[in-house]
Amino acid sequence: MKEFTFEVGVLSIFGQLNKKYTDELKENYSILEKRDETGRILSEEQIADNIIGVLFAAQDTTASVLTWILKYLSDDPKLLDAVRRELVLDLGNDEKNATNIQRYLIPKGWKAMPLFRNIHHNPEFFAEPGNFDPFRFENPPKPYTYMPFGSGIHACPGNELAKLEMLVLLHHMLSKYSLDYRWELVGSANLI
Ligand code: HEM
């Protein structure tokens, strides 16, 4: 059995793939149904052994290498600096072209984005930001406090299309369903 088969088997056993894909994989590669040259399927012990083997081979190795790398780098500031420089150079940037924002080095060509969600959820700009309250927009927000489509040269080019799509859907929902019927939540409210 090839190594590849084990990995796919583990994934399908843990159900991390969608059903169609998992079924297809089960048929072709599942560790549960795979037969060796003599036509025998693996025993439960062999299957467990393979799963533990893959988890160890993939996780423990990488985790311990990274742990030691971090330890040795923090022990030696010169080494740390050399590795950091190499990283910046590797990205095709000269530190002279890079820029610092607070204590972060942003190499040339990188895109730095604010976390819009945090701005939108800042109670300094929006009272009770967790509440869905469209009436809050009756007073226009301060500049650069509300940017659902981003800002600047990379602002969302789909902005107008997205708003049109939303308007079309809402138009149909409101004109057809809100008077005679109402739409309602199906299933658990906790999922939202
Ligand atoms: C409600 C719907 C949408 C929201 C909230 C949204 C939001 C955003 C945001 C926040 C950005 C990043 C802007 C920045 O970097 O400053 C973005 C980028 C982008 N969006 Fe949208 N978007 C939506 C719909 C769409 C649609 C419908 C399209 C295409 C038809 C689209 C295409 C893009 C593209 C191509 C970018 C990358 C722009 C760039 O990096 O230059 N988006 N969008």
Image: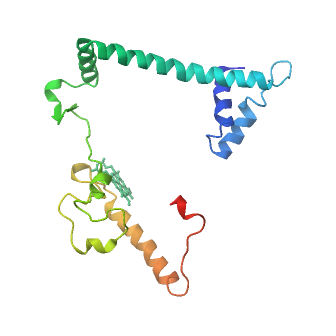
* Residue 94 appears left or right of 51: left
Residue at x 33%, y 72% (from the top left corner): 134
> In the visual, does 192 lie left or right of 82?
right
- Residue reaching furthest to the bottom: 180
Write the residue at 65% across / 40% down. Answer: 15
Q: Nearer the viewer, residue 30 or 67?
A: 67
In this rendering, the answer to whether 139 lies above or below 76 is below
* Residue 75 sits in quarter: top left
Q: Residue at coordinates 51% horizontally, 82% vertically from top-left?
A: 176
From what the image shows, is residue 92 above or below residue 127? Answer: above
Relative height, residue 86 to residue 126 (above, below): above
- Name the residue located 30 percent from the left edge and 75 percent from the top edge: 135
User: Could you say which is closer to the camera, residue 143 or residue 45?
Assistant: 45
Q: Position of residue 26 (x, y in %)?
A: 73, 36
Q: Residue 164 at x, y = what percent?
A: 37, 69
Q: How is the image coloured?
A: rainbow
Picture quarter with the N terminus: top right
On the rendering, which quadrant does ligand 1 occupy? bottom left
Q: Residue furthest left?
A: 96
114, 163: nearer the viewer: 114
Task: Tally the numbered discs.
Answer: 0
Residue 133 position in % (x across, y down): 34, 71
Quadrant of the image occupied by residue 151 = bottom left
**Residue 74, position in %: x, y?**
30, 17
Residue 45: image quadrant is: top right
